[in-house]
Amino acid sequence: MAEEVWLGGVHAVAALLKTEPERIRELRVLPGAGNERRRRLAERARRLGVAVASATRAELDRLAGPGHQGVAVRCRAGAVRDEHFLLRLLEELDHSPFLLVLDGVTDPHNLGACLRAADGAGADAVVAPRDRACGLTPTVRKVACGAAESVPFVAVTNLARTLAALREQGVWVVGLDAAAPRSLFEVDLAGPVALVLGAEGEGLRRLTREGCDHLVRLPMAGAVESLNVGVAAGICLYEGVRQRLARGEGRCPAPA
């Protein structure tokens, strides 16, 4: 039987209802007038044939943890993909691959933030090693605000080997390293690219660093030496978005 998890939060629940409603077993919602977003989610769930029931705040706290925003779903846990999925994905894309690779990120809040940034930037997948790194825990899913359900998360056995496979497929591998001679803003990110970030403090491991085509740094003009990996991922991803849009290759829709 597939593992089931409770996922809370308006954005996370909305994303799952939109992308994979078949995974949802039931929806619990805090009753009461005055919250239009919760009402719309409950209505959408009923239209999709999902069972909807009311719950107290204490029940939602117990099921989905604090920060549920008055709504939670019991659902089949999203699949973690592997190397074979990643290679198939590269073959099927109709645009230049845009990937985020995380080397040894163990904090679930950081992984959730990276997934959220990857979703917003239109990344095709987030890749991480299977061992000595955080997986898709309930905390990750909550922090990601639905991005754990919309961005493929690929857990690989050997990250160095995966980077080599990406390079063989024509993907430029760009690693973030504080000691790199060039700035992020000096490298071409508009084509097929995988942005590689390491864990806070430790940075990229040696084999990961050696598997990069380019190493770049973020200019740091203040007193701090580095940024949170979620913040750094957002900066790198959106520099890639900026360059891709300027080249006419971006996938971000215009504002409605």
Image (cartoon, rainbow, N blue to C red):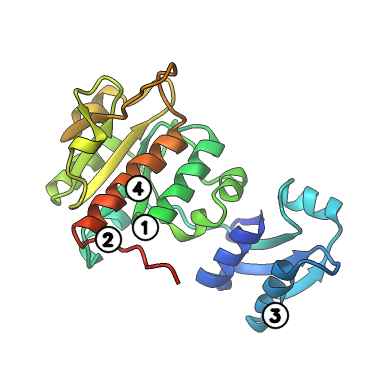
Identified at 31% across, 24% down, the residue is: 205
Identified at 50% across, 69% down, the residue is: 19
Q: Amino acid at mark 3?
A: Arg
Residue 238's label in the rendered image is 4
Percent position of residue 243, x then y: 24, 51
Label 1: which secondary element? loop
Badge 1 is on which residue? 122
Give the Cα separation between the discs numbered 4 and 1: 9 Å
Which dot, 1 or 3, sits closer to the camera? 1
Is 49 situated above or below 255?
below
The answer to the question of whether label 2 and label 1 lie on touching residues, with beta carbons closer than 8 A, is yes
The earlier-in-sequence mark between 2 and 4 is: 4
Q: Amino acid at mark 2?
A: Gly
Give the Cα separation between the discs numbered 2 and 4: 11 Å
Q: Is residue 163 left or right of residue 123?
A: left
Label 2: which secondary element? loop
Name the quarter where the C terminus is drawn. Answer: bottom left
Identified at 30% across, 37% down, the residue is: 196
Badge 3 is on which residue? 46
Percent position of residue 238, x then y: 35, 47
Who is closer to the viewer here, 18 or 75? 18
Residue 197's label in the rendered image is none
Circle 1 residues within 10 Å: few <14, some 14–19, many ≥20: some
Which dot, 4 or 1, sits closer to the camera? 4
The earlier-in-sequence mark between 3 and 2 is: 3
